[in-house]
Each structure stands twice: as C-alpha cells, then as structure tokens.
Image (cartoon, rainbow, N blue to C red):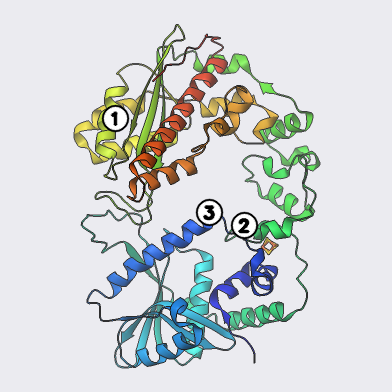
Amino acid sequence: MKRNLSKSKLISYRQCAKRIWLEVHHPERAKFSAATEAIFKIGHQVGGIAQALYDPDGIGAMIDLKAEGVDAALARTSTLLKWRRPVFEAGFASAGAMAFSDVLLPVGSHAWRMVEIKASGSVKNYQRDDAAIQSFIARKAGVELQAVALAHIDTSWVYPGGGNYRGLLKEVDLTDEAFARTDEVQEWIAGAHAAVDSNREPEIAVGKQCHEPFDCAFLGHCERGTVRASHPVEWLPRIASTKLKTFIADQTVRELSEVPDHLLNALQKRVRDCTVADEIYFDAPGAKSDLAGHALPGLFLDFETISFAVPIWAGTRPFQQIIFQFSVHRLEPSGEASHRAFLDVTGEDPSRRLAENLVESCGEHEPIFVYNAGFEGGRLAELAGRYPDLASGLRAIARRLVDLWPIAVRRYYHPKQQGSWSIKKLLPALVPALCYEDLGGVADGGAAQGAYMEAIQGGASGERVSELRAQLLAYCKLDTWAMVEIWNVFAGAGLNLAKSEN
Ligand code: SF4
C-alpha cells in the first residue's frame, strides 16, 4: 500500500528531492542545529498560546500525535469533527499525503475554518505552500473547508502583561490562493512519492537550496568527501548584485580567485585580493583622520540583548531586542582605563534599571565609541520611548555615539577576517594576543543569550547562576576592551593601555 507522506515531508521535497529521500531512508544522518531546536521550541510555545486564544472557553479537543500514533489520531479526528467544536492538531490523510492542522474551527452546521499558526513576524512563501498542502489534503479527505488562514506574530503588538496574549497573532486569509493551487500540490505529492520510491539517493550537489527556506539537517552528510575551497567565494562581503549572484550560481564558482574584476565592487576586490595574496590592507592615515575629531577621554560601550517571540515583560513587543547587560570602559588620555557594567539576572524586566545605570555611567561630554551605532542607537531610542523621564539622558548618549565599524570596513582588512568585520573576526586579526576563545563558557552573542536564559528561567542553582553571571560579565567586558584596542590602533595613539581590574 502506498504510504501517506506528511506535510513536513512534502515541504522537505519542495526544498530538495534528496532531503525527502534521506528523511525517509536515512533519518539517522540528520544533525539538527541548536538554532533549529530553538525554532521548534518557539513554535511549540506559540502553539500553546494559540490554543488558549482560539478556544478561550476550553471546549475544544487536542490530538496528541506522539502519544496516540498516526492511525488512532486520524480515527479520533473523524469522531471529534462530529462534535462541532475547535480541534487542535486534527489529522487527515488522502491522495497519498497526510497533514495535521494547527487549528480547525467549526463554521455553521457543516463547514470548518482552518488556521495555521506560525511563529514568524510575517507570511513566508513556504508557509503559503504549507497552507495550500494542508487545505488540499483536508478537502480531499472530505472536510468541508470554508476558509484557510495563516496566523503569524504581530510584531507591532505590545504585551500588556498578566498573561493576556490577545492580539499576539494576526491572521492573513489565504483561502483563494490556497484553493487555487490544487494542481501544484498534486504535482508535489507525485514528485515526492517518485523521489522516495527510488532505491538510490538522488544525486544533488549542495547549493543555495541547502539553506533556503531552512538550514538542511543533512548538510554534514551531503558535504562529506567534498574538497573545501581554500578561499571560498562566500567570503565576499555584501553580495547584492544580481550579476555576481548569477555568476556564482551558474559557474558553481568556489574560489575567490575565480571571480573577475568587473563583477566586484571596490570592497569585494579588496577582500578577494588581500585574501588570495595573504596581505593586510590598512589605511592608517585615513583611520586616524576619521577619529581625529573625537579626543579622549572616551567611553566604549556595548549591549547584550535578548528577544522573545512571545514577550514575557509588559510593555515589550514580540522579537524586540531588549538590553539585559551593558559594559562600558572609560579610557583616559594617559592610557589608563576604568570599567563599569550592568547585568540583571533576576528574571524581571531589566530595562528601567539598566536605563538608569546607563545614564549614570555615561557621563555627559565624552565621545562614546560603539561597534555598529545603528544597533545601539536603536536600543537607546526604544528605551527613551519607554521611559520619558529618562529620555533626554538616553538621547544625549545616542547623540555622542561614534561608530568604529564603518571605519574598520573602510580602512582595514586582514585575510583572517574571511570577509567579515564582526568584532569577533576583527579583534584576533588586529590584536592577536586577545581572543574570545579564551573566555570558555560565553564566547559569542548566541552563547550570551543562552546563558542569560538559563540564569533567569529558574532551573539553575545559585552557584550556577553566579557562574553564568561571571561568564556574561567577562564576555561583555572583552567586547568593550576589544573596542579600546581597536581604537588604539586606528587612532594611531600607540597608548600603553592599562586595563582596569574590576
Ligand atoms: S544538504 Fe542540500 S543537497 Fe543535501 S539534502 Fe539537504 S538540501 Fe539537499
């Protein structure tokens, strides 16, 4: 008997025929990244909230596919549909495919409305495919579907607090579009079956499809045995021109040295030439003149932020970047430095206390050096919007920001940067004695967010929270110290820097 391919398998087929083949024949070869696991977790959380929103009286029923198994879940769905009450994870099988719908709501005496819940801030193309597949299978299975909609997170909504998530989800009706794609869906199902029924793994080379619309968990498997480029073309920064994109895709170019001059802008040429020749580019007079108008004493500031698809603090929006930590170094003309930091791991909204501490720590006149002023400036503007009594102090800080990042991009490139000017790439190239790897526990922004979440979620012992706190403080402190070192080189100051002990 022909198997029913699940909706997620069909979406995998839409990404790559080899992916669905591997999922069916060799699922053990998949390696899920921490980012993918985190996406699953958020989807689960949003699904839980959607259930409360679409069934406020709690009269609906939930199918638990894992606990019940496919056959029982499909059978129970048939029974539940007779009740005319909301059904969550209702399952249908037909035409060689199978799908479980997030929300199914009764309309009148016979019809149903289907809502798919997505933990994203907008409707993506693959989610439109998802709605088309889902509604096709349900209708083929005999469900009188009147409408299909997708509910995604409304990023402009502000959480009022108290567990009230009304307004978190925003519906987009996809009925006409989804119902009009019947032929397409049938083709996908037929194609997916043909791919899966083959005895041989499809011969498909790794490419753009491995990361769009999702990072494929089989990348490690598909890349085995491939000889890596010594200077991969992916190191080119800001590949925006269609001509360059097409050239890379069509020619399957892998080495930077293969890309001709006429397709590259000045920055990309510099990256290609310096990387291939293993040479450093440094416009020292240019960097010095860029910084000449900002004399010491100066401050060096960095934020660490966290964001939640489902806000946990009143007054915040979904996906809003909320600062939970800052570090600020103050550098005197003598080269002596002092340090201040703020970190709140109580689990309460850190914003108010952080804003007060920030205003107090940033003085009034010194230039404030940051690495990517757009980010810091945006966070300062949000804090000013939330706390009008602190707004003038916060806006004054924003006006004093001096961005080291564009200076780095314009004036410096080291082959070790591999086409990136992130501070994590620039620091070891510019100041080899300093590197993030020595930090151990928290060595990048993602790890900082993970440590912060572990510290505030309540499951960690006091000792562990202290350990996480120390790691976070050390990490953010290194970020601002890195800026001090970068400034010292770029400004041509040659100061004998004296680090503060605290
Ligand atoms: S890694 Fe790329 S080529 Fe391999 S299965 Fe996934 S999408 Fe296909």
Q: Relative to 439, is 14 above or below?
A: below
* Amino acid on which the number 3 mark rests in the picture: Ala
Q: Relative to 56, is 152 above or below?
A: above
Image mark for residue 394: 1
* Amino acid on which the number 1 mark rests in the picture: Leu
Position of the N terminus by quadrant: bottom right
Q: In which quarter of the image is ligand 1?
A: bottom right
How far is disc 2 from disc 3 in space, using C-alphas? 15 Å
Mark 3 vs 1, N-terminal side = 3
Which residue bears the numbered disc 2? 211
Tell us which disc is closer to us: 1 or 2. Answer: 2
Disc 1 residue crowd, few under 14, some 14–19, many 20+, Cα 10 Å: many
Disc 2 residue crowd, few under 14, some 14–19, many 20+, Cα 10 Å: few
Which residue bears the numbered disc 3? 34
How far is disc 1 from disc 2 in space, using C-alphas? 39 Å
Identify the residue at the far top of this view.
334
Q: Relative to 263, is 283 above or below?
A: above
| Foreground of the two, 90 or 272 | 90
Tell us which disc is closer to us: 3 or 1. Answer: 3
Element class at badge 2? loop
Could you tell whether 451 is left or right of 225 in the image? left
The residue drawn where x is 73% and y is 29% is 274
Where is residue 245? Give x, y as percent: 69, 50
Mark 2 CB in 8 Å range of ligand 1? no
| Foreground of the two, 300 or 406 | 300
Could you tell whether 185 is left or right of 244 in the image? left
Where is residue 200? Give x, y as percent: 78, 74
| Foreground of the two, 88 or 464 | 464
* Amino acid on which the number 2 mark rests in the picture: His
Element class at badge 1? helix
